């Protein structure tokens, strides 16, 4: 048993970690691992500055390989060694059942257990599929051989994934640099408004890069560990295949369970969160913001309360004392004088302007697409609606809480700027180009303009 186990171990050590076949023209890397010359050269084919070891990931700065001719001769000897069938049979005769002291000649396929003739007497193994050990060993050797190619393919696929994942830090760096350049351009354009935000935003971006880099490194490590596990299973297949019939069948249950329990790690994808900066669109910067982030907002007639008349071009809404004869839609407001706008906002930055003129009562803002259309409670009780409103002579910013506002200049137009990712909705007095109020929240649902 010791000899066959040692021979199996020798033959496993004579294999190349890349192709998993006997070493051909063996060479050794700086870290001491052995490979076929052609395999390691192919592994480094697309590299010019660093050369990682496929086993331990140790990186060399040069393609430094040492030829191992003596190891090559040892591999040739290992290839010629084999265990003859008669020798295995002589070893089998020495394996006795611990309980009955009889030769183990049978195998239970239901329990994957080696048995002697006494073991199969009722009630033990009654009704189980029991067959001769020689026949069972032949079957399981064939079954083991079916693991070789899939395991080799898994190893090769995981190796490719590791290569791809190893290149992602460069991709991450490029994405970070591109986004940093965009942010710096915005900071430069609006420097007078953004000095307080620049350091905080870039710090968040750097922290996110560090966090993603750590997760990416952990993902690569997980794949490296998994490929080591697969190679261990493959080596175990080779080792078990060289064992005697009883030894093979004694180990087979443990091998099948271990091979079925192994699960490949998930591939980690870089998802760089869109960073942004908070700024007031004032003076000369306002036209640039409108040009870059301006959206065409229209009213949605299917949401308008029956007392609200929406113009044909969907740009104006007017109150009528008599309810209009309008079709029923589930999203139409029937208890409050509300109309919603289009489009929906799921991400990004958007700016639009609402003309309120000299009306004595109005409310404009943005809301979730799930506002109750038939609720009779007041607007102030709604959740998921952020708005600026005028009632009588009082201006209020109403969100989770209401804030009373004192405005020096009465606005005839309200500018709204939404930064979805940053979680901000800001209101501006377009009459004097001044900031009125900013809500900060976390947006997770589609948002719509609110009137």
Image: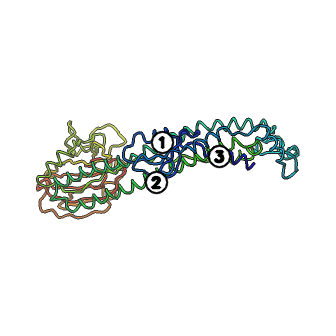
Q: Position of residue 388 (x, y in %)?
A: 23, 56
Q: Are marks 3 and 2 in contact (CB under 8 Å)?
A: no
The disc at residue 218 is 2
Q: Give the residue pinned by disc 3.
A: 10
Element at label 2: helix
Count residues near mark 1 (Cα–Cα under 10 Å), then give few for <14, some for 14-19, many for 20+: many
Q: Position of residue 294 (x, y in %)?
A: 20, 45
Q: CA distance from mark 3 to mark 2?
A: 33 Å
Residue at 48% across, 46% down: 66
Residue 173 or residue 120, whichever sits in front = 173
Q: Give the residue pinned by disc 1.
A: 40
Q: Position of residue 218 (x, y in %)?
A: 46, 54
- The answer to whether 405 is drawn above or below residue 362 in the figure is below
Residue at 30% across, 40% down: 302
Nearer the N terminus, badge 3 or badge 2? 3
Residue at 21% across, 63% down: 196
Q: Are marks 1 and 2 in contact (CB under 8 Å)?
A: no
Mark 1 vs mark 2, foreground winner is 1
Instruction: Indicate the quadrant where residue 149 lies.
Output: top right
Q: Is residue 12 visible?
A: yes
Nearer the N terminus, badge 3 or badge 1? 3
Element at label 3: helix
């Amino acid at each position: 048993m010791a000899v066959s186990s040692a021979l199996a171990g020798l033959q496993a050590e004579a294999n190349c970690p890349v192709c998993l076949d006997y070493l051909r023209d063996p060479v050794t890397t700086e870290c001491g691992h052995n490979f076929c010359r052609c395999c390691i050269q192919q592994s480094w084919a697309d590299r010019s500055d660093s050369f990682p070891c496929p086993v331990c990931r140790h990186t060399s700065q040069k393609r430094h390989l040492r030829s191992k001719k003596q190891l090559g001769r040892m591999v040739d000897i290992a290839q010629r060694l084999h265990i003859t069938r008669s020798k295995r049979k002589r070893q089998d005769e020495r394996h006795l059942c611990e309980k009955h002291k009889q030769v183990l000649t049978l195998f239970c396929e239901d329990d994957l257990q080696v048995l002697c003739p006494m073991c199969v007497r009722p009630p033990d193994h009654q009704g189980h599929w029991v067959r001769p050990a020689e026949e069972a060993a032949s079957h399981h050797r064939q079954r083991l051989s079916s693991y070789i190619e899939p395991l080799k393919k898994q190893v090769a696929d995981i190796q490719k994934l590791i290569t791809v994942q190893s290149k992602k830090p460069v991709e991450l760096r490029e994405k970070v640099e591109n986004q940093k350049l965009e942010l710096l351009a915005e900071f430069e354009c609006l420097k007078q408004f953004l000095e307080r935000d620049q350091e905080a935003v870039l710090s968040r971006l750097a922290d996110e890069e560090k966090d993603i880099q750590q997760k990416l490194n952990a993902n690569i490590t997980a794949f490296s560990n998994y490929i080591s596990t697969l190679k261990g299973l493959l080596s175990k297949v080779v080792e078990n295949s060289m064992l005697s019939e009883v030894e093979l069948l004694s180990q087979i249950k443990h091998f099948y369970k271990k091979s079925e329990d192994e699960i490949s790690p998930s591939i980690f994808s870089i998802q760089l969160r869109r960073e942004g900066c908070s700024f007031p669109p004032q003076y000369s910067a306002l036209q640039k913001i409108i040009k870059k982030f301006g959206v065409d907002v229209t009213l949605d007639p299917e949401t308008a309360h029956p007392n609200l008349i929406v113009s044909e071009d969907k740009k104006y809404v007017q109150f009528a004392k008599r309810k209009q004869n309008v079709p029923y839609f589930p999203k139409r407001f029937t208890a409050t004088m509300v109309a919603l706008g289009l489009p929906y906002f799921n991400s990004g930055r958007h700016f639009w302007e609402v003309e309120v003129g000299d009306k004595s009562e109005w409310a404009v803002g943005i809301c979730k697409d799930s506002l109750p259309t038939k609720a009779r409670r007041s607007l102030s009780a709604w959740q998921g609606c952020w708005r600026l409103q005028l009632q009588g002579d009082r201006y209020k910013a109403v969100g989770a809480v209401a804030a009373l506002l004192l405005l020096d200049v009465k606005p005839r137009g309200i500018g709204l700027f939404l930064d979805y990712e940053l979680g901000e909705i800001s209101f501006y007095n377009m009459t004097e180009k001044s900031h009125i109020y900013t809500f900060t929240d976390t947006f997770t649902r589609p948002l719509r303009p609110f009137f």
